[in-house]
Amino acid sequence: MQYDVIIVGAGPAGLSAAAFAARRKLKTLVLEATSKVGGKPVNVYGTKIVDDFIGFPDGVKGKEVGEALLRQAQKFGAEIKCESRVSKVSIENNDKLVSTDDGKTYRAKAVIIATGSHSKSFVGGIEGEAEFKNKGVSYELQNPNEMKDKIVFVVGGGETAVETAITLKDIAKQVYLVHRRDSFRADEILVEQLKKSKINILTNSRLQKIHGDDKVTGVTIYNDATKKEIEMKADQVIFCFGTVPASEMLKDLNVKLDEKGLIMVDCDQKTNIEGIFAAGDVAGGAMRISTAIGEGVKAALNAYKYIKQPYWA
Protein backbone atom coordinates (compact mmCIF):
# COMPACT_ATOMS: atom_id res chain seq x y z
CA MET A 1 0.00 0.00 0.00
CA GLN A 2 1.24 3.51 -0.83
CA TYR A 3 1.62 6.15 1.88
CA ASP A 4 2.93 9.68 1.89
CA VAL A 5 5.05 9.14 4.99
CA ILE A 6 5.93 6.09 7.07
CA ILE A 7 7.14 6.63 10.62
CA VAL A 8 9.17 3.85 12.21
CA GLY A 9 8.62 3.85 15.97
CA ALA A 10 5.70 4.96 18.14
CA GLY A 11 7.47 6.73 20.99
CA PRO A 12 7.19 10.47 21.69
CA ALA A 13 9.13 11.43 18.53
CA GLY A 14 7.19 9.05 16.29
CA LEU A 15 3.74 9.90 17.62
CA SER A 16 4.32 13.66 17.49
CA ALA A 17 5.59 13.27 13.92
CA ALA A 18 2.47 11.25 13.09
CA ALA A 19 0.15 13.89 14.55
CA PHE A 20 1.72 16.72 12.58
CA ALA A 21 2.05 14.76 9.34
CA ALA A 22 -1.56 13.56 9.47
CA ARG A 23 -2.74 17.04 10.42
CA ARG A 24 -1.25 18.29 7.16
CA LYS A 25 -3.29 15.60 5.38
CA LEU A 26 -0.36 13.34 4.56
CA LYS A 27 -1.36 9.68 4.42
CA THR A 28 0.56 8.52 7.45
CA LEU A 29 1.51 5.07 8.73
CA VAL A 30 3.30 4.36 12.01
CA LEU A 31 5.02 0.99 12.44
CA GLU A 32 5.78 -0.06 16.02
CA ALA A 33 7.80 -3.17 16.88
CA THR A 34 6.18 -3.84 20.26
CA SER A 35 2.58 -4.48 21.28
CA LYS A 36 2.20 -1.07 22.93
CA VAL A 37 2.71 2.46 21.66
CA GLY A 38 4.26 5.27 23.66
CA GLY A 39 7.90 4.19 23.81
CA LYS A 40 9.86 4.49 27.05
CA PRO A 41 7.36 6.77 28.81
CA VAL A 42 4.84 3.90 28.64
CA ASN A 43 7.04 0.79 28.66
CA VAL A 44 9.70 1.90 31.17
CA TYR A 45 8.26 4.87 33.08
CA GLY A 46 4.56 4.02 32.89
CA THR A 47 3.72 4.59 36.55
CA LYS A 48 6.56 7.00 37.28
CA ILE A 49 5.87 10.71 37.63
CA VAL A 50 7.84 12.49 34.91
CA ASP A 51 8.70 15.91 36.34
CA ASP A 52 10.85 17.26 33.50
CA PHE A 53 8.13 17.20 30.82
CA ILE A 54 7.47 20.82 29.90
CA GLY A 55 3.93 22.05 30.53
CA PHE A 56 3.21 19.84 33.54
CA PRO A 57 4.73 21.59 36.58
CA ASP A 58 3.29 19.00 38.96
CA GLY A 59 4.57 16.12 36.85
CA VAL A 60 2.68 13.54 34.81
CA LYS A 61 2.81 9.76 34.59
CA GLY A 62 4.78 8.43 31.63
CA LYS A 63 1.81 6.31 30.57
CA GLU A 64 -0.40 9.40 30.40
CA VAL A 65 2.10 11.16 28.12
CA GLY A 66 2.11 8.20 25.72
CA GLU A 67 -1.67 7.86 25.73
CA ALA A 68 -2.19 11.57 25.01
CA LEU A 69 0.24 11.51 22.09
CA LEU A 70 -1.50 8.44 20.67
CA ARG A 71 -4.94 10.07 20.88
CA GLN A 72 -3.69 13.16 19.10
CA ALA A 73 -2.07 11.17 16.28
CA GLN A 74 -5.24 9.10 15.82
CA LYS A 75 -7.44 12.21 15.97
CA PHE A 76 -5.85 13.46 12.75
CA GLY A 77 -6.07 10.09 11.03
CA ALA A 78 -2.64 8.48 11.42
CA GLU A 79 -2.72 4.71 10.96
CA ILE A 80 -0.77 2.77 13.59
CA LYS A 81 0.32 -0.86 13.35
CA CYS A 82 1.82 -2.54 16.41
CA GLU A 83 3.96 -5.70 16.41
CA SER A 84 5.38 -4.58 13.07
CA ARG A 85 9.14 -4.71 13.51
CA VAL A 86 10.96 -3.03 10.63
CA SER A 87 13.87 -5.08 9.31
CA LYS A 88 14.93 -2.98 6.34
CA VAL A 89 14.47 0.39 4.66
CA SER A 90 15.38 0.61 0.97
CA ILE A 91 14.75 2.81 -2.07
CA GLU A 92 13.16 1.87 -5.39
CA ASN A 93 13.03 4.70 -7.92
CA ASN A 94 11.56 7.56 -5.88
CA ASP A 95 9.73 5.32 -3.41
CA LYS A 96 10.97 4.36 0.03
CA LEU A 97 10.29 0.70 0.82
CA VAL A 98 9.85 -0.31 4.44
CA SER A 99 9.97 -4.06 5.09
CA THR A 100 8.85 -5.78 8.30
CA ASP A 101 9.73 -9.09 9.91
CA ASP A 102 6.34 -10.57 8.99
CA GLY A 103 7.16 -10.28 5.27
CA LYS A 104 5.17 -7.14 4.49
CA THR A 105 6.53 -4.20 2.49
CA TYR A 106 5.07 -0.70 2.58
CA ARG A 107 5.78 2.17 0.17
CA ALA A 108 6.08 5.85 0.98
CA LYS A 109 7.44 9.09 -0.40
CA ALA A 110 9.27 9.84 2.85
CA VAL A 111 10.30 7.93 5.96
CA ILE A 112 10.89 9.21 9.49
CA ILE A 113 13.02 6.97 11.70
CA ALA A 114 11.99 7.39 15.36
CA THR A 115 13.02 4.02 16.78
CA GLY A 116 14.67 5.36 19.92
CA SER A 117 17.26 3.31 21.74
CA HIS A 118 17.47 0.18 23.86
CA SER A 119 19.51 -0.79 26.88
CA LYS A 120 22.90 -2.38 26.36
CA SER A 121 22.55 -6.12 26.73
CA PHE A 122 26.09 -6.90 27.90
CA VAL A 123 28.78 -5.00 29.79
CA GLY A 124 31.73 -7.41 29.66
CA GLY A 125 34.76 -7.80 31.88
CA ILE A 126 32.72 -8.84 34.92
CA GLU A 127 33.02 -12.41 36.12
CA GLY A 128 29.62 -14.10 36.32
CA GLU A 129 27.74 -11.60 34.16
CA ALA A 130 27.11 -13.97 31.26
CA GLU A 131 26.49 -16.94 33.54
CA PHE A 132 23.73 -15.21 35.50
CA LYS A 133 22.12 -13.18 32.72
CA ASN A 134 18.33 -13.46 33.23
CA LYS A 135 19.06 -15.33 36.47
CA GLY A 136 19.41 -12.24 38.60
CA VAL A 137 21.33 -10.09 36.12
CA SER A 138 19.38 -7.61 33.99
CA TYR A 139 19.97 -4.38 32.08
CA GLU A 140 16.88 -2.36 32.84
CA LEU A 141 14.07 -2.24 35.38
CA GLN A 142 10.97 -3.66 33.67
CA ASN A 143 8.74 -4.52 36.62
CA PRO A 144 9.64 -2.84 39.94
CA ASN A 145 7.31 -5.11 41.90
CA GLU A 146 9.46 -8.13 41.00
CA MET A 147 12.18 -6.59 43.19
CA LYS A 148 10.02 -6.72 46.32
CA ASP A 149 11.98 -7.90 49.38
CA LYS A 150 15.15 -8.41 47.32
CA ILE A 151 18.67 -7.07 47.83
CA VAL A 152 19.30 -5.14 44.63
CA PHE A 153 22.56 -3.72 43.27
CA VAL A 154 22.12 -1.01 40.63
CA VAL A 155 25.33 -0.34 38.70
CA GLY A 156 25.92 3.02 36.99
CA GLY A 157 26.03 6.76 37.61
CA GLY A 158 23.73 8.29 35.01
CA GLU A 159 20.08 9.27 34.90
CA THR A 160 18.77 5.73 34.41
CA ALA A 161 20.83 4.26 37.24
CA VAL A 162 19.82 6.92 39.76
CA GLU A 163 16.16 6.79 38.72
CA THR A 164 16.16 2.99 38.97
CA ALA A 165 17.60 3.09 42.47
CA ILE A 166 15.10 5.74 43.60
CA THR A 167 12.19 3.77 42.11
CA LEU A 168 13.19 0.70 44.14
CA LYS A 169 13.94 2.42 47.45
CA ASP A 170 10.51 1.60 48.94
CA ILE A 171 10.05 -1.74 47.17
CA ALA A 172 13.28 -3.71 47.54
CA LYS A 173 14.58 -4.95 50.88
CA GLN A 174 17.86 -3.08 50.28
CA VAL A 175 19.13 -1.01 47.37
CA TYR A 176 22.80 -0.38 46.61
CA LEU A 177 23.96 2.03 43.92
CA VAL A 178 27.47 1.19 42.69
CA HIS A 179 29.34 3.89 40.77
CA ARG A 180 33.00 3.95 39.81
CA ARG A 181 33.31 7.72 40.28
CA ASP A 182 32.63 10.07 43.21
CA SER A 183 30.04 12.20 41.39
CA PHE A 184 27.01 11.46 39.21
CA ARG A 185 25.96 12.44 35.67
CA ALA A 186 22.26 12.47 36.58
CA ASP A 187 20.30 15.70 37.05
CA GLU A 188 21.15 17.45 40.29
CA ILE A 189 17.58 17.20 41.59
CA LEU A 190 17.72 13.39 41.23
CA VAL A 191 21.10 13.22 42.97
CA GLU A 192 19.64 15.29 45.80
CA GLN A 193 16.75 12.81 46.15
CA LEU A 194 19.23 9.95 46.06
CA LYS A 195 21.35 11.34 48.88
CA LYS A 196 18.30 12.01 51.05
CA SER A 197 17.02 8.46 50.64
CA LYS A 198 17.94 5.24 52.43
CA ILE A 199 19.75 3.93 49.35
CA ASN A 200 23.26 2.66 50.05
CA ILE A 201 25.61 4.65 47.78
CA LEU A 202 28.92 3.00 46.92
CA THR A 203 31.05 5.54 45.03
CA ASN A 204 34.61 4.98 43.74
CA SER A 205 33.51 1.36 43.49
CA ARG A 206 33.36 -1.33 40.83
CA LEU A 207 31.40 -4.54 40.68
CA GLN A 208 34.07 -7.19 40.06
CA LYS A 209 32.27 -10.51 40.33
CA ILE A 210 28.76 -11.95 40.54
CA HIS A 211 28.29 -15.09 42.64
CA GLY A 212 25.54 -17.68 42.73
CA ASP A 213 24.39 -21.21 42.00
CA ASP A 214 21.30 -21.33 39.79
CA LYS A 215 20.72 -17.60 40.42
CA VAL A 216 22.53 -14.59 41.87
CA THR A 217 23.33 -14.82 45.58
CA GLY A 218 26.11 -12.27 46.02
CA VAL A 219 28.63 -9.84 44.51
CA THR A 220 32.21 -8.74 45.02
CA ILE A 221 32.74 -4.97 45.14
CA TYR A 222 36.16 -3.32 44.80
CA ASN A 223 36.71 0.19 46.18
CA ASP A 224 39.31 2.17 44.21
CA ALA A 225 39.87 4.64 47.06
CA THR A 226 40.53 2.10 49.83
CA LYS A 227 41.97 -0.58 47.49
CA LYS A 228 39.82 -3.14 49.29
CA GLU A 229 37.25 -5.62 48.07
CA ILE A 230 34.24 -6.92 49.92
CA GLU A 231 31.75 -9.71 49.29
CA MET A 232 28.09 -8.84 49.83
CA LYS A 233 24.78 -10.68 49.59
CA ALA A 234 22.65 -9.88 46.54
CA ASP A 235 19.53 -11.15 44.80
CA GLN A 236 19.57 -8.92 41.74
CA VAL A 237 22.10 -6.90 39.73
CA ILE A 238 20.78 -4.25 37.33
CA PHE A 239 23.34 -2.74 34.96
CA CYS A 240 22.44 0.78 33.81
CA PHE A 241 25.32 1.50 31.46
CA GLY A 242 23.70 3.57 28.76
CA THR A 243 21.78 2.74 25.61
CA VAL A 244 22.30 1.67 22.01
CA PRO A 245 20.47 3.48 19.17
CA ALA A 246 18.03 1.27 17.26
CA SER A 247 19.38 2.09 13.80
CA GLU A 248 20.21 -1.42 12.57
CA MET A 249 17.46 -1.46 9.90
CA LEU A 250 19.42 1.20 7.97
CA LYS A 251 22.61 -0.84 7.54
CA ASP A 252 22.06 -1.36 3.79
CA LEU A 253 20.90 2.17 3.01
CA ASN A 254 24.18 4.05 3.58
CA VAL A 255 22.57 6.47 6.00
CA LYS A 256 25.39 8.21 7.84
CA LEU A 257 25.81 7.08 11.45
CA ASP A 258 28.31 8.30 14.02
CA GLU A 259 30.68 6.03 15.92
CA LYS A 260 27.93 5.18 18.44
CA GLY A 261 25.41 4.23 15.75
CA LEU A 262 23.37 7.42 16.12
CA ILE A 263 21.75 8.68 12.93
CA MET A 264 23.38 11.91 11.78
CA VAL A 265 20.85 14.63 10.91
CA ASP A 266 20.94 18.32 10.05
CA CYS A 267 18.92 21.09 11.70
CA ASP A 268 15.82 19.97 9.74
CA GLN A 269 16.12 16.32 10.95
CA LYS A 270 17.23 15.31 7.44
CA THR A 271 19.69 12.47 6.96
CA ASN A 272 22.16 12.32 4.08
CA ILE A 273 19.59 10.31 2.08
CA GLU A 274 16.89 12.39 0.41
CA GLY A 275 13.45 11.74 1.88
CA ILE A 276 14.77 9.96 4.99
CA PHE A 277 14.44 11.84 8.28
CA ALA A 278 15.23 10.88 11.88
CA ALA A 279 14.09 12.18 15.27
CA GLY A 280 14.36 11.39 18.97
CA ASP A 281 16.88 9.24 20.82
CA VAL A 282 17.99 7.38 17.67
CA ALA A 283 19.48 10.68 16.49
CA GLY A 284 21.07 11.56 19.84
CA GLY A 285 20.65 15.05 21.22
CA ALA A 286 19.30 15.80 24.69
CA MET A 287 17.35 12.52 24.91
CA ARG A 288 14.37 13.97 26.74
CA ILE A 289 10.65 13.55 26.04
CA SER A 290 10.19 17.24 25.25
CA THR A 291 13.13 17.24 22.84
CA ALA A 292 11.93 14.08 21.09
CA ILE A 293 8.49 15.62 20.58
CA GLY A 294 9.99 18.77 19.10
CA GLU A 295 12.24 16.80 16.77
CA GLY A 296 9.31 14.65 15.67
CA VAL A 297 7.30 17.76 14.81
CA LYS A 298 10.23 19.24 12.89
CA ALA A 299 10.79 15.99 10.96
CA ALA A 300 7.11 15.81 10.00
CA LEU A 301 6.93 19.41 8.78
CA ASN A 302 10.09 19.01 6.72
CA ALA A 303 8.81 15.71 5.32
CA TYR A 304 5.67 17.62 4.26
CA LYS A 305 7.81 20.21 2.47
CA TYR A 306 9.77 17.44 0.77
CA ILE A 307 6.63 15.62 -0.44
CA LYS A 308 4.34 18.53 -1.30
CA GLN A 309 6.92 21.18 -2.23
CA PRO A 310 4.56 24.08 -1.37
CA TYR A 311 5.30 27.46 -2.89
CA TRP A 312 6.11 28.96 0.51
CA ALA A 313 8.80 26.43 1.38
Image (cartoon, helix red, strand yellow):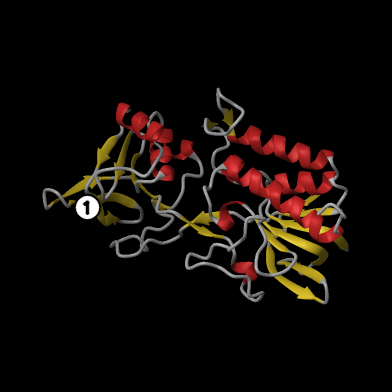
Q: Residue placed farthest to the top in the image?
A: 58
- Left or right: residue 262 compared with residue 114: left
Q: Residue at x 66, y 39 (%)?
A: 66
- Left or right: residue 2 compared with residue 290: right
Residue 272 is situated, as x and y percent measured from the top left of the image, at 65, 69
The N terminus, quarter of image: bottom right
- Residue denoted by label 1: 220
Q: Residue at x 53, y 52 (%)?
A: 285
Residue 134 is situated, as x and y percent measured from the top left of the image, at 44, 55
Q: Residue at x 48, y 64 (%)?
A: 260
Q: Amino acid at mark 1?
A: Thr
Question: Closest to the observer: 66 or 284?
Answer: 284
Report which quarter residue 152 is drawn in. top left
Classed neighbour count for the residue bearing mark 1: other residues with Cα under 10 Å, few (<14), some (14–19), many (≥20): some
Report which quarter residue 32 is drawn in. bottom right
Is residue 148 in view from this perspective? no
The C terminus, quarter of image: bottom right
Tell me the SS state at disc 1.
strand
Residue 47 is situated, as x and y percent measured from the top left of the image, at 56, 32
Q: Residue at x 41, y 58 (%)?
A: 133
Question: Closest to the observer: 302 or 118?
Answer: 302
Q: Reply above or below: 210 against 163.
A: below
